[in-house]
Image (tube, rainbow, N blue to C red):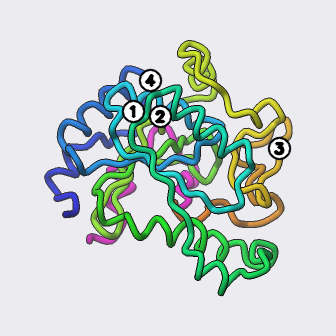
Amino acid sequence: MAISDSEFQALPHQGDVAASEEETGRVLSSVLARFPGRVAVISSFGAESAVLLAQVAAQDKAVPVFFLDTGRHFPETLAYRDELSRHLGLEDVRTLQPAPAEVAYRDPGGQLVAFDPDACCALRKVEPLEVVLPEFDIWVTGRKRMQAATRAALPVAERQEDGSVKLNPLAGWSEEQIARFMKDKALPPHPLVAKGYRSIGCEPCTRPVGEGEDSRAGRWAGLTKTECGLHRPVPAPPDANAEEVSAAALIAERPAR
């Protein structure tokens, strides 16, 4: 069952919502209470994932959390997934993997990423998640506007073509808030953060970030690719202040389902 129009209107929409720990907690609490059994989290268990997962765990440790194991992750990421899950007491972490037969057929030598990274992401991320997408109506993500220009106008509630909604409760958070929350809650950091990795995906497509670069500059460096396909870029319109763009205005421009 997709989110109805009335249910969608009841979700938080304004661009300045979810800009603090308290507001994010209220958003998560209200959504989980209003849509029991219809909410799931998708997490990369990356550099900043602990912030969202800690706040989800504070509301309900049994919320399903999906992790896409592409087979190309850093070993540190897999270890961090297990460590952070134990630390937060997450009770329902589900790992998705690409179909072995599809990998054998479409990428037998493991070189697909070198000549068609979009196809590699489709095989290892998009298609495995599509199998479970219909099971939930709201997918919670940890995306933030400050991460890159391609996310500068990220709405809090983002309606999808299939009628589901991506909820981005950390949309308005700053780097300072992220760092302060991690410290205050004594959350374990991803081990690669200390080595300069500020956004962590698959090993072949991720490098450390240089001074002054966006946190996602190390993803698919040198390519025009900015997202793996699970999400779409949401850049700010020309001459617009991203903090003043409301999710409702952005979503109104999209075709009705």
- Residue under circle 3? 208
* Residues at marks 4 and 2, CA–CA distance in whole angstroms: 15 Å
Q: Are marks 2 and 3 in contact (CB under 8 Å)?
A: no
Q: Are marks 1 and 2 in contact (CB under 8 Å)?
A: yes
Eye-nearest disc, 4 or 2: 2
* Residues at marks 2 and 3, CA–CA distance in whole angstroms: 23 Å
At x 58%, y 73%, the residue is 122
Q: Which mark is residue 253?
A: none
- Residue under circle 1? 56
**Dot 4 alpha-carbon crowd within 10 angstroms: few under 14, some 14 to 19, many 20 or more:** some
Q: Point out the tag, 4 or 3, that comes first from the N-terminus.
A: 4
The amino acid at mark 3 is Pro
**Dot 1 alpha-carbon crowd within 10 angstroms: few under 14, some 14 to 19, many 20 or more:** many
Q: Point out the tag, 1 or 4, that comes first from the N-terminus.
A: 4
At x 70%, y 65%, the residue is 225
The amino acid at mark 2 is Leu
Q: Position of residue 38 (x, y in %)?
A: 25, 51
Q: Position of residue 85 (x, y in %)?
A: 51, 35
